[in-house]
Amino acid sequence: MTFVGPEGPVRRAGSPSGCSSSSFAGAVGLFGTTPRSRTGRYGTTTVTVTYPAVSRGGLAVHYQIEVQRPGGFAGPVRLGVTERYLDAFDENGVSPEPSSETVDGALLVWEFDPPVGDTLTVSLDARVEPDTRWRRRGHAVLYDGERPVLDLGYTSYFAP
């Protein structure tokens, strides 16, 4: 609605269209973080990556890779994550801590000692860097020895 004041037309703040835009932004997660998951299989091994599909700078995010293998793990578990994707975060640590880290092209590769039981759950304690904006694509990769065998791609959107 427009009012005419002594200095000309004045647009009123808080118009109905502004309210619905704010409601829509909140509903789609622009004021918080919306997690999503991708799952893939390699033989009897199932890998699920949970990542922030929508978030914004300064917010804590849930990033986790879960590897399940019936009967357990005979040797170390190797997982790769896109380094450029990880650059979007202020990382406070990876749990459990990898026994080693290497780089394979665009991937940071973590090697974990075999866990007790059928499941390895790797969690990243992180917040979105304040200046991170727009879209970042990432990959979580399972290795069989030195060979990548499963690649789960995903995309996160970071609002200003």
Image (spheres, rainbow, N blue to C red):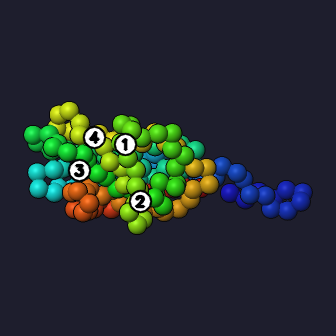
Q: Are marks 1 and 3 in contact (CB under 8 Å)?
A: no
Residue placed under numbered mark 2 in the picture: 103
Residue type pointed to by label 2:
Val
Q: Nearer the viewer, residue 102 or 48?
A: 102
Percent x, y of residue 155: 40, 60
Q: Callout 2 environment at 10 Å: few (<14), some (14 to 19), or many (20+)?
A: few
Label 4 Cα crowd, 10 Å radius (few <14 / some 14-19 / many 20+): some
Give the secondary structure at mark 3: strand
Disc 1 element: loop
Q: Residue at x 85, y 62 (%)?
A: 8
Label 3 or label 2, whichever lies nearer to me, is 2
In x, y percent, where is residue 60?
50, 40
Residue 97 x, y percent position in the rendering = 39, 38
Amino acid type shown at disc 1 = Pro
Give whichever of discs 4 and 1 has the lower sequence position: 1
Q: Are marks 3 and 4 in contact (CB under 8 Å)?
A: no
Asked if the residue under mark 1 is in contact with the one under mark 2, i.e. CB atoms within 8 Å, the reply is no
Q: Are marks 4 and 1 in contact (CB under 8 Å)?
A: no
The residue under the point 52% across, 49% down is 89
The residue identified by callout 1 is 98
| Element at label 4 | loop
Distance from disc 1 to disc 3, alpha carbons, whole Å, reads 17 Å
